Amino acid sequence: MTAGHPDTVGSKPASFADITTMRIGGRIGKFIQPASRAEFILSLVDADSEHLPLCVIGGGSNMLVSDDDFNGVVVRDARRKVSILDEAVPAGPGEPKLVHVEAEAGTNWDDFVEYTVRMGMEGIEGLSGIPGTVGASVVQNIGAYGQEAASAVSSVQVWDRKAQKVINLKKEEMGFGYRTSLLKKTMYEGMDERTNGRTPSQYFPSPRYIVLSVVFELRHSATGVVGMAQLAKALQARIGERIAASDIRTAVLQIRTGKGMVEDPSRYGNPWMKGTKDPTEVHNAHQADRIQPDYDRWSCGSFFVNPVITPAQADAVLPVDAPRFATILPDGSEGIKTSAAWLIDRAGFHKGFTVNGRAALSSRHTLALTNRGGARSDDIVRLARTIREGVQQAFNIDLVPEPVFIGL
């Protein structure tokens, strides 16, 4: 174990319930928070050499874990340094000036977004308020309000658990797709993005490639582009209009807060979470919303990905008033993306829907499955299964869960 980072507080061992946004999960065999690059890599090597299950965790926001004990190693990167590598470098004649910023994997994602906006950079302001870390952002390829992590990534430095060495992956080598990446795909054998038939690989529940740091390529601009209708309405602006990036960030945070799709700041009072987010930002979050506890925030965020289907499938199964957005399928052909939240609601599962009272759809957003204060992992699984079966029956569309399931 890394010195100075115990896996107990008093006599209480760490549990996934302590470190995940769903606040569910069993006790952890060994919990390590390395504060240096060497310690971080050593913790990965040690776990693999001992053939122990290895879970590298960020903010714990995209996972659902069994209540059984986890007899493995959980590593949470405590490195949070952000460095501007170069400033105002022109991409070419007449093109916007670019800034390359490197962030260590353990950096809180929203802290990083706030920093870039404050420093006059554009490119990820629409991703404000998403729980998690910089490292997790590229594994999942997070996205919201017209932006996604992939569009801002220049390169990713990783530890290759198979080759036992550090390598740099360029953006084009990252295999980014809708809510996925090369890294995420290495967690599974023969992963089918369209179904939930995923077989864990030898590296599960972590990728083969563990993120050490990410270099982002952002634009040196105090303004950003309004990317979606919902955001445009909140800002009283037009889609495509340029306005202050700080205003976009503020609007995104307000929208997400209204849906309960931001972290509950009270989790940072938990001794296992202290130090993982900027104290000023924690204070600001408390000031913005004093509801305690807010069970709508005890979730994994969006529990299902928006279905992506062929145009022919869309014509066959979607009602005429269903949301449809043009997209590209994995094979490069044209596809249609529709709204999972819309399908869930139209299938009869409205805000607040519950099976047993312990787990329920958020009272503010049908895409979030929430722990109402005493739920176990089985309660969430049962609720998810009920919703998936209902949507399948109503629309012949199989909703794919977004979180990583561990021990379930």
Image (cartoon, helix red, strand yellow):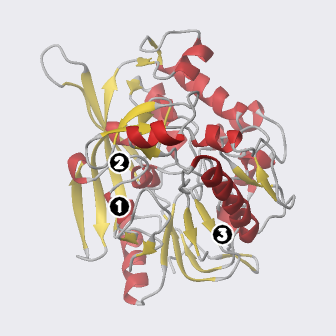
Q: Residue at x 76, y 69 (%)?
A: 376
Front-lying residue, 405 or 315: 315
Q: Which residue is mark 2?
A: 177
Q: Name which of mark 3 and mark 1 comes first in the sequence.
A: 3
Q: CA distance from mark 3 to mark 2?
A: 28 Å
**What amino acid type should be assigned to the residue bearing mark 2?**
Gly
Q: Which of the 4 image quadrants contains residue 162?
A: bottom left
**What amino acid type should be assigned to the residue bearing mark 3?**
Phe
- The percent coordinates of residue 225 (x first, y second) are 42, 18
- As drawn, is 93 to the left or to the right of 385? left
Q: Residues within 10 Å of mark 3 (few under 14, many from 20)?
A: many
Q: Which residue is mark 3?
A: 16
Q: Look at the picture and state if 140 lies above or below 93.
A: below
Q: Look at the picture and state if 63 lies above or below 258.
A: below
Q: CA distance from mark 3 to mark 1?
A: 22 Å
Q: Which residue is mark 1?
A: 183
| Secondary structure found at label 3 | helix
